Amino acid sequence: MGNEGTDRSEVVAVSRDRDHRFSKPVVDEVTLVEGWGIEGDAHAGTTVQHRSRVARDPSQPNLRQVHLIHAELFDELDATGYTVEPGQLGENVTTRGVDLLGLPTGALLHLGDDACVRVTGLRNPCQQINGFEPGLLRQVLGRAEDGTVSRKGGVMGVVVAGGVVRPGDGVRVELPEGVLEPLSPV
């Protein structure tokens, strides 16, 4: 797991936004803070920060401190006529060469020299994606051949070790011990 046709699994872009907007501007670097998320990002915090989740129960733990998407999704979307760039789907970290959707719950993603994110689950694509580009939701949320829901909108995680992350940094996957549990939406 981790290398799919590239010489190296890496970070291709990082994004953050202090405000709750759908897309996040690409920046030169982000600082991950243990137990908090990305410094200066609206979704950082120990409790839920996504508006819909805050409305339901603001005391829930924040399992969505960091949103990661694989750049291979953008390649796939481009082949269907949709042009999507890093940060435009609201992710904080865009990777290449890592099978994010195939990771088990609890996998650790070591980003650069120091930062580490524990994967908590899948991002559940929502209707806002169609506001960004009409029809895009059906490209990132569909049905697999067996009839199950297929979510391609990336993964969510929590910061377990802080550090600065920049484009070009390596990504190393560490699988959890024991029985590997597939990702489910968080």
Image (cartoon, rainbow, N blue to C red):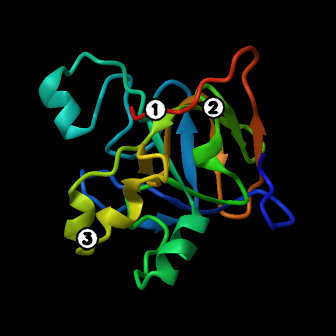
Disc 1 to disc 3, C-alpha distance: 24 Å
Q: What residue did someone put label 1 on?
A: 184
How crowded is the residue under tag 1: few (<14 C-alpha within 10 Å), some, or many (20+)?
Answer: some
Q: Secondary structure at mark 2?
A: loop
Q: Secondary structure at mark 1?
A: loop
Q: Secondary structure at mark 3?
A: helix
Q: Quadrant of residue 129?
A: bottom left
Q: Earlier in the sequence, mark 2 or mark 1?
A: 2
Counting from the top left corner in percent of width and height, residue 12 is at: 64, 65
Name the residue at 32% across, 69% down: 136
Q: Which mark is residue 74?
A: none
Counting from the top left corner in percent of width and height, residue 38 is at: 47, 42
How crowded is the residue under tag 3: few (<14 C-alpha within 10 Å), some, or many (20+)?
Answer: some
Name the residue at 43% across, 81% down: 83
Type of the residue with mark 2: Pro
Instruction: Please indicate whether residue 14 sits to the left or right of residue 23 in the image.
Output: right
Q: Quadrant of residue 138?
A: bottom left
Q: Are marks 3 and 2 in contact (CB under 8 Å)?
A: no
Instruction: Please indicate whether residue 150 sits to the left or right of residue 68 in the image.
Output: left
Type of the residue with mark 3: Phe
Name the residue at 19% across, 39% down: 51
In the rendered view, would you say 60 is above or below 116? above
Type of the residue with mark 1: Ser
Q: Which mark is residue 104?
A: 2
Q: Earlier in the sequence, mark 3 or mark 2?
A: 2
Q: What residue did someone put label 3 on?
A: 132
